[in-house]
Image (cartoon, rainbow, N blue to C red):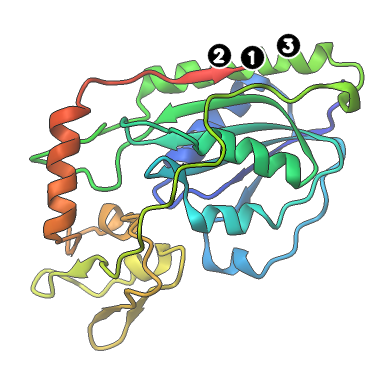
Amino acid sequence: MNISSVKLAYFSPTKTTQKILEAIAQGVEYNDVGHIDLTPPDSRTRTFEDFNQDLVIIGAPVYGGRLAGEAVKRISMLKGHYTPAVVVVLYGNREYEDALLELKDLAIKLGFVPVAGGAFIGEHSYTKPEFPLSAGRPHSQDLEKAMGFGKAIRRKMDAIKDIKSQDPIDVPGHFPYKDHKPSSNESASTLEDICIACGTCAAICPTAAIMINERVETDSTLCIRCCACVKSCPTQARVMESSRIDKIVKWLSENYSVPKQPETFI
């Protein structure tokens, strides 16, 4: 099949999903690779051109076995016309459950034809030094597997004659999807004695939930607990302090510490 370019479309607050998509694109080996970063707040109001002679690699994180709700909203602004797509989810070493199927179904609804899918592991948003949750992932082996996945995708694309006659790939998951977990009003907070008010947290927040005035203020109704601010703070002044989350972190560490491996479908 004649492909003019590869487009990477992703919601990736902590950059782990983005890293996997970039590695896949390296393996695909098309010269023209473009990024559609759906993470910044302004992506909620942008307009995007429809895709035609492109291969689109769509990536999003998993929250509790489902796609992150904010990712669904932003990916839903994309439109394909029998456009081949690769659907990729990134999860924190527990389970991806229905998320990959959900992304595949969403892609089809938006006019894409999913020709491949993958579930990769990334450092969990809630990881802590005392309870590391898939810390440092995706690591070099994950990226190598992503590149190998990209090479397999390229072979498949070269063999496809007519995308309109191509059946979407099968991926694990159940429909109806599992229920989303109840929303929470928890948010990251700031240790003011070590905060230098540099604005990094506000700049990286995907929902513009953080404001820098005389002090750092967080709108808990906008926070999606992605922990991008926690991971990016240069002085470690942003923290996620919650007894509920601490219990989750301890449970995950005790029950899901054995490293899982990426799964791909093509």
Badge 2, how many Cα within 10 Å: few under 14, some, many 20+?
some
- Element under disc 3: helix
Quadrant assignment for the N terminus: top right
Q: Is residue 24 left or right of residue 208?
A: right
Kind of residue at badge 3: Arg
Q: Position of residue 95 (x, y in %)?
A: 37, 31
Q: Are marks 1 and 3 in contact (CB under 8 Å)?
A: yes
- Element under disc 2: helix
Residue at x 20% of width, y 36% of height: 252
Q: Is residue 11 left or right of residue 53?
A: left
Kind of residue at badge 2: Gly
Q: Position of residue 67 (x, y in %)?
A: 49, 46
Badge 1, how many Cα within 10 Å: few under 14, some, many 20+?
some
Reading the chain from its start, which is encountered first: label 2 or label 3? 2
Kind of residue at badge 1: Lys
Q: Which mark is residue 155?
A: 3
Alpha carbons under labels 1 and 3: distance apart = 6 Å
Task: Report if residue 34 is visible in the image.
Answer: no
Residue labelled with disc 2: 148
